[in-house]
Image (cartoon, helix red, strand yellow):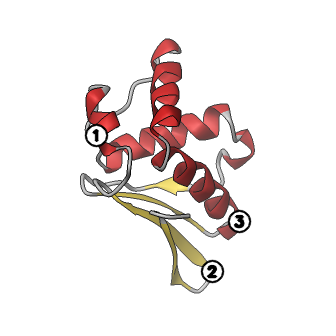
Amino acid sequence: MTPLKLVETLPGSYSLLLNAGTTRVDGTVEELGHEPNGYFWEGVARFLVGTEAKSLEGRVSYDPEGGMFCAYGTDRTALEELGALLSAVAADTDRMRALVASAEATGFEFDD
């Protein structure tokens, strides 16, 4: 799940974390006109859930900041699945380009 981390914050409560600005695709994100901050990554997560992982809808919550993406909840499996999706995008510039193009084509707006 690199560069994301899944931590148990309290017994039965989990957070999926990504330090913004630490991925292989940060330069690509900037080239595409976006800021690779926590809010942008929330948009990526929401877009992925809405288009590729509808089974995750309602199973995680989001609480990003400028320097960090955070998804949280009690469903560890859902957070692991989201982490795997995000990890794949965070490591692949072509995947990121395709995701942003697809999002823009549908009118999706990243809040970065």
Marks 1 and 2, how far apart in space?
36 Å
User: Is residue 66 visible in this depiction of the protein?
Assistant: yes
Marks 3 and 2, how far apart in space?
12 Å
- Depth check, mark 1 against mark 3: the one in front is 1
Look at the picture and state if 6 lies above or below 72: below
The residue wearing badge 1 is: 27
Question: Given the image, on which type of amino acid does mark 3 rest?
Answer: Thr
Secondary-structure class at tag 1: helix
For the residue pair 31 and 86, the one nearer the viewer reads as 31
Q: Residue visible at 56% across and 64% down?
A: 1
User: Is residue 112 visible in this depiction of the protein?
Assistant: no
Look at the picture and state if 58 lies above or below 50: below
Q: Looking at the image, is mark 3 or mark 2 earlier in the sequence?
A: 2
Q: Residues within 10 Å of mark 2 (few under 14, many from 20)?
A: few
- Depth check, mark 3 against mark 2: the one in front is 3
The reply to whether dot 1 and dot 2 touch (C-beta < 8 Å) is no
The reply to whether dot 3 and dot 2 touch (C-beta < 8 Å) is no
Marks 1 and 3, how far apart in space?
30 Å
The quadrant where residue 41 appears:
top left
Q: Residue furthest right?
A: 55
Secondary-structure class at tag 3: helix
Q: Looking at the image, is mark 1 or mark 2 earlier in the sequence?
A: 2
User: Residue 46's spot in the image, x, y percent?
Assistant: 53, 40
Q: Residue visible at 66% across and 54% down?
A: 59
Q: Is residue 94 left or right of residue 64?
A: right
For the residue pair 36 and 94, the one nearer the viewer reads as 94
For the residue pair 50 and 88, the one nearer the viewer reads as 88
Find residue 77 and name its label: 3
Find residue 12 and name its label: 2
